[in-house]
Image (tube, rainbow, N blue to C red):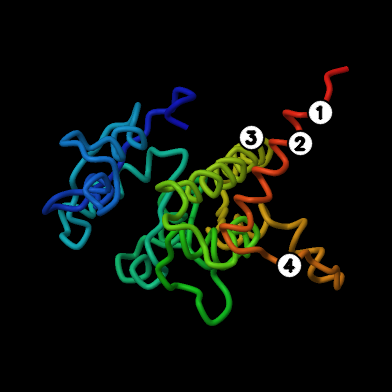
Amino acid sequence: MADFGAQVIKVEPPGGGDIHRYGHQLPGMPVSEIPYTFQVENRNKKSIVLDLKAEAGREIMLDFIAKADVFVTNYRTQALKKLKMTYEDFKKINKRLIYAYASGYGETGPEAGKPGYDMVSFWTRSGIEAQVFPVEGWPCGFPYGSGDRPAGMNLLTAVLLALLSREKTGEGSRVTTSLLSSGAWTNSTMIQAALCGAQFNPKVPANGLIILLTFIICRKTAAPSS
């Protein structure tokens, strides 16, 4: 939304701010003193530090909500209820508010409310990892945050549809997505194949995959040009 000109204010907690500011320091990440993980995600945004557990911080937050078009959060449901930051709480202040909620595993089922990360929720639990990795896996995983972005775009789509609906009704609404549901949507063709009882090709070990790819490249190189 910030890329398209919206004024986006990121609310961060005291004592260091968003932990994403330190994502570049995770083991295995490209080494740099510049917080590049946060820079790319926080582009075109403003930030403010608020202690939402303190009354003063909450009053400032509610003032933002009263004037906002969209509120986006990935806090777990228990925390939102404790902080009185649910859709029902905010709707009393701003009936035109679009409340966008992102989670790891959705809002129903035995894992609702649990924390989730793209490597597990998006890639592994959706079955995508099993489709693209050889039988013993690769020595490294998927690029940092590469499951978060598709899920974020899904949430943006829902927000835009909610804004369009508000133009017609004058009322705000609550929209959601999860890493797991976004991963399942991405992998929906293969999931549907499994539901239909389709026969999948057996997975091969990494060395076998390398040999196969080498064979294909050699065949293509040796093929006469038309």
Disc ID at residue 202: 4
Nearer-N-terminus badge (2/3): 3
Distance in Å between CA atoms under marks 4 and 3: 51 Å
**Side of 157 relative to 68 (left or right):** right
Disc ID at residue 207: none
Nearer-N-terminus badge (4/3): 3
Rendered residue at 29%/39% (across/down) = 38
Q: Amino acid at mark 2?
A: Arg
Distance in Å between CA atoms under marks 1 and 4: 28 Å
Q: Residue furthest top?
A: 226
Percent of width and height locating residue 159 = 57, 43
Rendered residue at 45%/26% (across/down) = 3
Q: Residues within 10 Å of mark 4 (few under 14, many from 20)?
A: few
| Residue under label 3 | 167
* Residue sitting nearer the eye, 117 or 193: 193
Q: Are marks 4 and 3 in contact (CB under 8 Å)?
A: no
Rendered residue at 61%/60% (across/down) = 181
Nearer-N-terminus badge (4/2): 4
Comparing labels 4 and 2, the label whose residue is closer to the camera = 2
Disc ID at residue 219: 2
Nearer-N-terminus badge (1/4): 4
Q: Secondary structure at mark 2?
A: helix
